Amino acid sequence: MKIARQNFIVYLIWIFLVGEVIWSLWQAQWNGAFVAAVTLGLTLLPLLFEERLGVKLPMTFGAMVVIFLFATLFLGEVGGFYARYWWWDVILHSGAAVGFGLIGFVLVFMLFEGDRFAAPPFSLAILSFCIAVSIGTIWEIFEFALDETFGFNTQKSGLKDTMWDLIVNAIGASIGGAAGYFYLRRWYFGGLAKLIGQFIEANKQYFRKHK
């Protein structure tokens, strides 16, 4: 996910966030400037991830991460999408959980160097599910910290909202884990198998036994 090789949507989001930081500071809207700056910083984390770990994120993966962070933090909070659209939170959490499930699968599959025959499909699916649920739980803790520290309202109704988020996260994680299971069985699960294939293709050095 190099800066010079991005989906045009990612560039638009970066440009918008930089402009929003400048405009909010000019208008003394400190809360909006802070959220825009934090969102911008988080969208750059995949670049650091690639540099530190030597793992290449396909353009589609990188774009999904950036779009999710922008939709969650900036549109959700500054844009007020959580209050305007009741389904906004549900879509984001379910979509993110599916993505986390896929990421969990490829990371665990990497340990087997892409060997389909050595990797137990059901066990990898369970591990992918657990990783996705764990990330979702950490995200809920992050939302709680934002609410308590900066007075945001990411958790809205509190416990009930958090529990529904965790339920939706578990469902999405199940789909991501199932996609990995079907991929190993060569029962391709819609377009999710294509995303797995893109990641493996971009990181062939870690999947030397893949066939």
Image (spheres, rainbow, N blue to C red):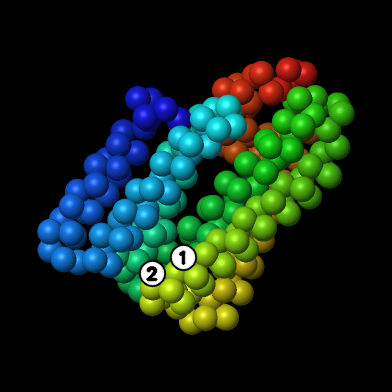
Judge by depth and name the residue closer to the eye, 179 or 152. Answer: 152
Residue to which mark 1 is pinned = 89
Q: Is residue 79 visible?
A: no
Quadrant position of residue 193:
top right
Local crowd at mark 2 within 10 Å, few (<14), some, or many (≥20)? many
**Percent position (x, y) of residue 49?**
53, 37
What element does badge 1 sit on?
A: helix
Which amino acid type is marked by label 2? Tyr
Quadrant holding the C terminus = top right
Q: Residue at x 27, y 49 (%)?
A: 17
Q: Residue at x 43, y 74 (%)?
A: 149
Q: How many numbered circles does the render carry?
A: 2
**Percent position (x, y) of residue 57?**
52, 31
State the mark number for residue 36. none
What element does badge 2 sit on?
A: helix
Residue to which mark 2 is pinned = 82
Quadrant position of residue 105:
top right
